[in-house]
Image (spheres, helix red, strand yellow):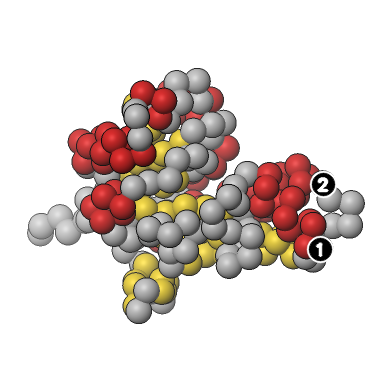
């Protein structure tokens, strides 16, 4: 009888910093929480990103494509695109990648790029909302609940189809740093591996620009 198993999807993770979300993905893959995919390569925009150390410790191939070596974002996007094609990426995960991808990458990988944002989109998202700035804005507004969103990436910042969201309570004495840590631990590190696994199992369907999880 012929082997009908689907080929394992290549997950390429783009990073710029510490790589805590990458670590969550590595641990999820090791524990069998990610079905049908493996992290085949980690690409960093910075030579000194600690995420590279995390990848190397787990025998994952790494590549460094420094943003500073390119005159403009278009040239940089072309270099990233060439690397993604060389690595035969089936899914691209942005895990703290601090550079906006050019539209040539979005067009080459439609609904194959996902990002995790540390708020409940459409709140506190879009241009300029990244890192602690997101949590500062949430606390300034006085929201009682924040959280994280995993979404597909399109040409507009944080505007792609939402895959998963998880709320996290905001406490009276929260600082941006404390809230950031709670959202990472309670939401980002849980829903990002789950979304990756759903993609790798072909369980995400797009209808009218929205993402639906197959029953």
Q: Which image quadrant is residue 211 in?
A: bottom left
x, y percent for residue 136:
74, 50
Residue 59 is situated, as x and y percent measured from the top left of the image, at 39, 25
Secondary element at image label 1? loop
Mark 2 residue element: loop
- Quadrant of the frame with the C terminus: bottom left
Q: In this view, does 213 lie to the left or right of 164?
A: left
Q: Is residue 152 left or right of residue 2?
A: right
Q: What is the x, y in percent for residue 154? A: 38, 59
Q: Identify which residue, 98 or 164, lies in the foreground.
A: 98
Which residue is at 26% across, 39% downward? 78
* Residue that label 1 marks: 142
* 50 up-or-down from 192: above or below: above
Question: In the figure, residue 148 lies in which quadrant?
Answer: bottom right
**Label 1 – label 2 distance at C-alpha:** 12 Å
- Write down the residue under mark 2: 175
Q: Which of marks 1 and 2 is nearer the N terminus?
A: 1
């Amino acid at each position: 009888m012929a082997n009908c198993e689907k080929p394992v999807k290549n997950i390429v993770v783009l990073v710029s910093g510490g790589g805590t979300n990458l670590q969550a993905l590595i641990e999820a893959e090791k524990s069998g929480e990610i079905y049908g995919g493996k992290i085949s390569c980690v690409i960093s925009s910075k030579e000194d990103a600690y995420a590279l150390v995390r990848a190397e410790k787990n025998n994952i191939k790494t590549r460094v494509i420094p943003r500073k070596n390119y005159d403009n974002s278009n040239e940089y996007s072309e270099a990233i695109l060439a690397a993604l094609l060389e690595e035969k990426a089936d899914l691209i995960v942005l895990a703290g990648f601090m550079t906006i991808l050019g539209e040539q990458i979005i067009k080459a990988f439609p609904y194959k790029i996902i990002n995790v944002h540390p708020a409940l989109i459409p709140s506190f998202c879009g241009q300029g909302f990244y890192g602690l700035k997101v949590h500062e804005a949430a606390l300034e507004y006085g929201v009682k609940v924040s959280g994280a969103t995993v979404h597909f990436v399109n040409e507009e910042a944080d505007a792609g189809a939402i895959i998963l969201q998880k709320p996290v309570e905001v406490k009276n004495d929260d600082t941006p740093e404390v809230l950031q840590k709670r959202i990472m631990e309670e939401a980002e590190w849980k829903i990002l591996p789950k979304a990756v696994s759903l993609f790798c199992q072909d369980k995400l369907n797009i209808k009218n620009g929205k993402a639906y999880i197959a029953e």
